[in-house]
Amino acid sequence: MHNSLPCVIRFLLAVSLLAPALAQQLRPIDLPKPDTSGGRPLMQVLKDRATVREFRSEKLSPQVLSNLLWAAFGINRPESGKRTAPSAVNRQEIDIYVAMKEGLYLYGAKAHRLEPVLAEDIRALTGRDAFVGEAPLNLIFVADFARMGNSSDQNKIFYSAADTGFASQNVYLYCASEGLGTVVRGGVNREALQKTMKLRPEQRIILAQTVGYPRQK
């Protein structure tokens, strides 16, 4: 009886230490259906498209987040699974990771939901500017070279960069339409971020993009 007491104590101690981690586990987030009926005229949006580097900490609503991600690289033709941005040979090799205060998620376009990746606030790791840790949302564009077949490394780099550009511009246009601010960023410590995100060797971080409400209009 006495010999088992330390085991019981160790078990209870382990449970007490594990409880906070379990409480902080991320759950999938089912996004609202994107509202595709709104928005401002395209020419006005192009006129107002701009880069912003000062953000309020105010969170985006679930509907705004849903619309934003769908605009970036959502499925706009369900019958074929094709997307709002083009990709070379329709390989759809770009994944969008979503870094928020609550943690890191992966946008699943097919189910239109956020899949949990990491229960940790890694916003500050997504760039070298101070504002990245304060803005409510940082998108991380990751290319999966494993989806790009037998293309040469040079072509994989070229086309994944181009495809990221298409999606990030969609984000710019949506933000201009909805009064949000955004900036796309190449200044990323890719090696450190890749390690934190636990990416495979075939996955490459291309760019990051900060989104939030501008501090000053």
Image (cartoon, rainbow, N blue to C red):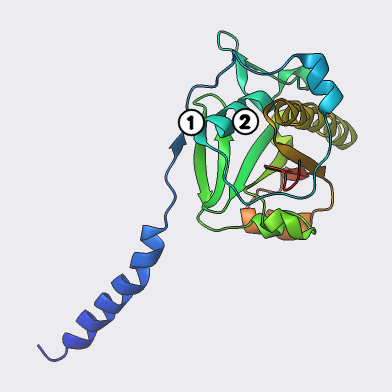
In screen coordinates, is 174 left or right of 119? right
In screen coordinates, is 163 left or right of 5? right
| Residue 48 image point, x, y percent | 82, 27
Can you say whether 140 is above or below 47 in the image?
below
Q: Residue 69, which numbered label? A: 2
Pointer 2 with pointer 1, Cβ within 8 A: yes
Q: Secondary structure at mark 2?
A: helix
Task: Give the quarter of the figure containing the C terminus.
Answer: top right
Residue type marked 2: Leu
Read off the residue under disc 1: 31
Q: Which of the 4 image quarters holds residue 209? A: top right
> Residue visible at 79% across and 22% down?
45
- The residue closer to the viewer here, 45 or 185, is 45
Task: Give the quarter of the figure containing the N terminus.
Answer: bottom left
Q: Is residue 195 visible?
A: no
> Residue visible at 83% across and 33% down?
156
